[in-house]
Image (cartoon, grey):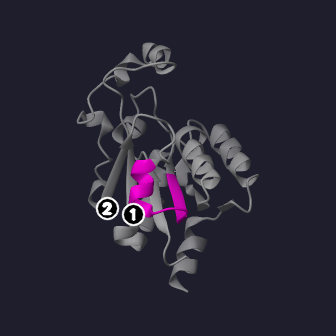
């Protein structure tokens, strides 16, 4: 796992801020472990950012009709990486989609990499990223205690779904993963 990449999905203010419609209630708890992982992975850490498109198209049109507050430019404060994590974001990849696996992320981590994935929301952007990466041939490890869902129940359900994809996807806690990296 020494050549693995950490992908911290969407650890942004929009998911941390308690007044946001998109808050992940356990964001701050997950952020502690995301920081530990990013510190361990150093420059092999990639942080992703969900940003709204300038002009939503297709199914995204009714989505943003439901969530008009999110139609802000990428530089808006709510789309910033959370302040505590921003110094650890050596590389950042942006996407207008829930899933972050695609050409931009692959350009950073390479084709069919070993990925360690954490972030928010477990039941949306993390799940979408993990399944697409696994389908593309990446070996993916999900770190549930470094993830936060839209609710505890939805988080647990998403982790259970990802566990169904073993051996393409494995589930490992932060402490165990860090012990593995140190060995």
- Residue lying at the far bottom of the rendered structure: 183
Q: Which mark is residue 14?
A: none
| Circle 2 SS class | helix
How far across and down, in percent of the image, does residue 165 sit? 73, 54
Circle 2 residues within 10 Å: few <14, some 14–19, many ≥20: many
- Image quadrant containing the N terminus: bottom right
Q: Is residue 111 magenta?
A: yes
Do tag 2 and tag 1 residues touch (Cβ < 8 Å)?
yes
Q: Is residue 13 magenta?
A: no
**Residue at position x 45%, y 16% from top?**
61
**Residue at position x 40%, y 28% from top?**
20
Residue 56: quarter of image? top left
Label 1, on which residue? 45
How far across and down, in percent of the image, does residue 163 sit? 72, 54
Start and end of the magenta stretch?
103-118
How far across and down, in percent of the image, does residue 70 sit? 36, 24
Of labels 2 and 1, earlier in sequence is 1
Label 2, on which residue? 88
């Amino acid at each position: 796992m020494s050549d693995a990449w950490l992908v911290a999905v969407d650890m942004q203010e929009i998911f941390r801020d308690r007044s946001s419609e998109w808050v992940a209630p356990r964001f701050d708890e997950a952020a502690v472990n995301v920081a530990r992982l990013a510190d361990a992975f150093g420059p092999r850490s990639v942080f992703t950012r969900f940003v709204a498109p300038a002009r939503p198209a297709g199914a995204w049109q009714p989505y943003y009709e439901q969530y008009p507050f999110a139609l802000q430019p990428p530089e808006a404060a709510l789309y910033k990486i959370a302040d505590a994590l921003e110094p650890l974001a050596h590389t950042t990849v942006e996407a207008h989609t829930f899933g972050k696996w695609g050409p931009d992320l692959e350009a950073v981590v390479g084709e069919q990499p070993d990925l360690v994935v954490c972030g928010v929301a477990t039941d949306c952007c993390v799940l979408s990223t993990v399944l697409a990466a696994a389908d593309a041939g990446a070996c993916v490890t999900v770190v549930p205690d470094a993830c936060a869902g839209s609710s505890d129940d939805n988080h647990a359900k998403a982790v259970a779904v990802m566990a169904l994809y073993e051996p393409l996807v494995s589930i490992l806690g932060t402490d165990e993963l860090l012990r593995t990296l140190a060995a």
